């Protein structure tokens, strides 16, 4: 089990604070200038993926001390507790075994008296058979036509993961199927998707771990009504609706046949579920074999995470760096910057993964922590982001650690595009690190006009880049299902390490409940025309809506 112990009570923490005082004034520019081996010292390799940590504000001692912190916080034992199926999700009384979904060994892993790995295999076989029928055309709609469109209806973890993966691996997509995602309870989402579709050739995947999520059920009912408006007979539902859920009773009550239900288990967290039946839309889009490659990439990262010593362990180091910046430097946000159009949804996906997991302030014994936990995750694809928010990263007042992510090879090698893209990637990490001094700005003026005029001198401070902005660069050969699987698993394990260090529970999400409860109450009050007991602002907003709703 995970123990309750504040990181700030460790010996390593005290050493880290003293060490921080030494590192903080140092400039990355000097750290590079003084050590020609800096890249080699901080470049970590996982198969063909390079994790370059050298542009972080660290020294070798930093990583040694962070590793000491991980040792004192018993990260190694915590990893074992997770993989071996201990109930580390204590606030929900559950084991945490998303890693079992991509475990291809013939191990036994008992959960509640069943071999979890066998259950996983059974559902995988069911998914494989379904995909094969769909792709061969054996599975048809109620009028005998081939299915041409798949619509995944789900939200949060039942949407963001599969949507991001389908987008990221578009190049591998089966040409005969279009895949759509509907998540928002805003009727516009369903309306704008449905108007493009034909009920005779559309199959809906209702993805919900609990099958109680209001948004998903509302969208599922809308889809069913839309379908039945044309198909009429409820018997036809079984050719057009399948469900992915742990709640098989609620699925049956909705009217989806048991043979069209793909199960998973409460030991798979929603935001860790894309490897489970929740990945069915991915398997449909790419073919089951590609989906399996994704799982195998994740499995390889799982092995690295479980077996590699902490000091060389990539997700461990990534998690520790987060503590270093959040708690020592006081960084409040962290940017995810994929230089790959296919990965443009990665920041959104990681927002849920990291912030829903570690956006907590109660320590494992329920006390309020007296240090910072999860920073805000944000970001967007480069180079577009360079023309929107990079200004702030370069010259704003916040320290924002960044992850730059890019493939060496493009799936679309057109002209010099990829070279240009990567040149920007390299240039930005260099510029953030080095910055530009006042003297360098003046020298530029001199180069142009031989002197620095008074007017130009006024501009100097505006053109200075402080630099010393940390970044981690992640590069891989090509974005394949396998590589993507390993990258996602790396971030999942980073989340885990952060949670262990921050002494919080990463696998619950009680923080989303209050808003859900209140929404239910308010919806009922509005429908019944009843006055609720709210504050004056909420009452005023409801009154505005009532006055203007039609
Ligand atoms: O937002 C809370 C949450 O429970 C997420 O953790 C989850 O991914 C999402 O809702 C959807 O839940 P479900 O898959 O049960 O519909």
Image: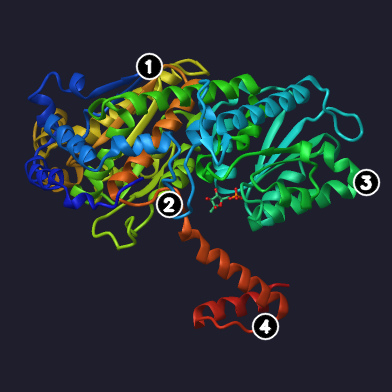
Residue at mark 3 to residue at mark 4: CA–CA distance: 38 Å
Q: Position of residue 467 (x, y in %)?
A: 19, 38
User: Of the numbered discs in the image, which one, if any, rests on residue 105?
Assistant: none
Look at mark 3 in the image and give the residue it sits on. 233
Look at mark 1 in the image and give the residue it sits on. 47
Tell which of 211 and 423 is nearer to you. 211
Tell which of 46 and 22 is nearer to you. 46
Look at mark 2 in the image and give the residue it sits on. 90
Tell me if label 2 and label 3 are in contact, CB under 8 Å.
no
462 shown above or below 480: below
- Mark 2 or mark 1: which is in front? 2
**Position of residue 161 in the picture relative to residue 192 (left or right):** left
Looking at the image, tell me whether mark 2 or mark 1 is earlier in sequence order: 1
Is residue 72 something that shows in the picture? Answer: yes
Q: Position of residue 409 (x, y in %)?
A: 44, 16
Residue at mark 4 to residue at mark 1: CA–CA distance: 61 Å
- Mark 2 or mark 3: which is in front? 2
User: Is disc 1 placed on a helix, strand or loop?
Assistant: loop
Tell which of 319 and 331 is nearer to you. 319
Crowding near the residue tagged with mark 4, few <14, some 14–19, many ≥20 C-alpha atoms within 10 Å: few
416 shown above or below 207: above
Looking at the image, tell me whether mark 4 or mark 1 is earlier in sequence order: 1
Tell me if label 4 and label 1 are in contact, CB under 8 Å.
no
């Amino acid at each position: 089990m995970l123990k309750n112990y504040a990181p700030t009570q460790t010996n390593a923490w005290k050493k880290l604070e003293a060490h921080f005082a030494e590192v903080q004034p140092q400039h990355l520019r000097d750290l590079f200038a003084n050590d020609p081996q800096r890249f080699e010292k901080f470049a970590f390799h996982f198969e063909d993926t390079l994790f370059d940590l050298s542009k972080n504000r660290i020294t070798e001692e930093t990583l040694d001390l962070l590793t000491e912190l991980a040792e004192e916080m018993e990260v190694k034992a915590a990893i074992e507790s997770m993989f071996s199926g201990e109930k580390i999700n204590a606030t929900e009384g559950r084991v945490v075994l998303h890693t079992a979904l991509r475990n291809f060994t013939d191990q036994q892993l008992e959960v509640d008296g069943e071999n979890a790995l066998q259950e996983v295999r059974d559902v995988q076989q069911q998914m494989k058979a379904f995909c094969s029928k769909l792709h061969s055309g054996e599975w048809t709609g109620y009028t005998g036509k081939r299915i041409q469109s798949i619509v995944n209806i789900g939200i949060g973890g039942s949407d963001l993961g599969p949507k991001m993966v389908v987008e990221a691996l578009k190049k591998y997509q089966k040409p005969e199927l279009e895949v759509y995602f509907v998540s928002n309870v805003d009727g516009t989402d369903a309306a704008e998707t449905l108007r493009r579709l034909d009920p005779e050739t559309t199959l809906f995947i209702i993805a919900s771990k609990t099958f109680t999520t209001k948004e998903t059920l509302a969208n599922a009912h809308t889809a069913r009504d839309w379908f039945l408006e044309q198909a009429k007979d409820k018997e036809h539902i079984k050719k057009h609706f399948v469900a992915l859920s742990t709640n098989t009773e609620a699925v049956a009550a909705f009217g989806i046949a048991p043979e069209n239900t793909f199960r998973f288990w409460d030991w798979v967290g929603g935001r860790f579920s894309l490897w489970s039946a929740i990945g069915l839309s991915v398997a449909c889009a790419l073919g089951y074999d590609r989906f399996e490659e994704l799982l195998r990439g994740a499995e390889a990262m799982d092995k690295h995470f479980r077996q590699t010593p902490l000091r060389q362990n990539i997700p461990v180091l990534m998690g520790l760096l987060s503590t270093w910046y959040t708690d020592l430097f006081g960084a409040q946000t962290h940017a995810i910057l994929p230089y790959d159009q296919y990965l443009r949804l990665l920041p959104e996906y990681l927002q849920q993964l990291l912030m829903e997991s570690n956006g907590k302030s109660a320590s494992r014994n329920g006390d309020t922590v007296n240090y910072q936990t999860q920073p805000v995750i944000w970001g967007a694809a480069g180079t577009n982001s360079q023309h929107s928010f990079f200004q702030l990263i370069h010259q704003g007042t916040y320290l924002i650690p960044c992850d730059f992510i890019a493939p060496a090879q493009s799936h679309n090698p057109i002209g010099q595009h990829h070279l240009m893209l990567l040149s920007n990637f390299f240039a930005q990490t260099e510029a953030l690190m080095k910055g530009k001094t006042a003297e360098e700005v003046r020298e530029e003026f001199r180069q142009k006009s031989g002197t620095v005029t008074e007017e130009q001198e006024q501009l100097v401070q505006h053109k200075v880049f402080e630099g010393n902005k940390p970044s981690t660069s992640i590069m891989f050969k090509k974005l394949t299902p396998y590589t993507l699987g390993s990258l996602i698993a790396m971030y999942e394990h980073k989340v885990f390490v952060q949670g262990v260090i921050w002494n919080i529970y990463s696998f619950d999400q009680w923080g989303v409940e209050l808003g859900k409860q209140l929404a239910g109450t308010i919806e009922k009050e509005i429908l019944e025309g009843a006055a609720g007991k709210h504050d004056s602002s909420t009452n005023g907003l409801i009154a505005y809506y009532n006055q203007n709703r039609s």
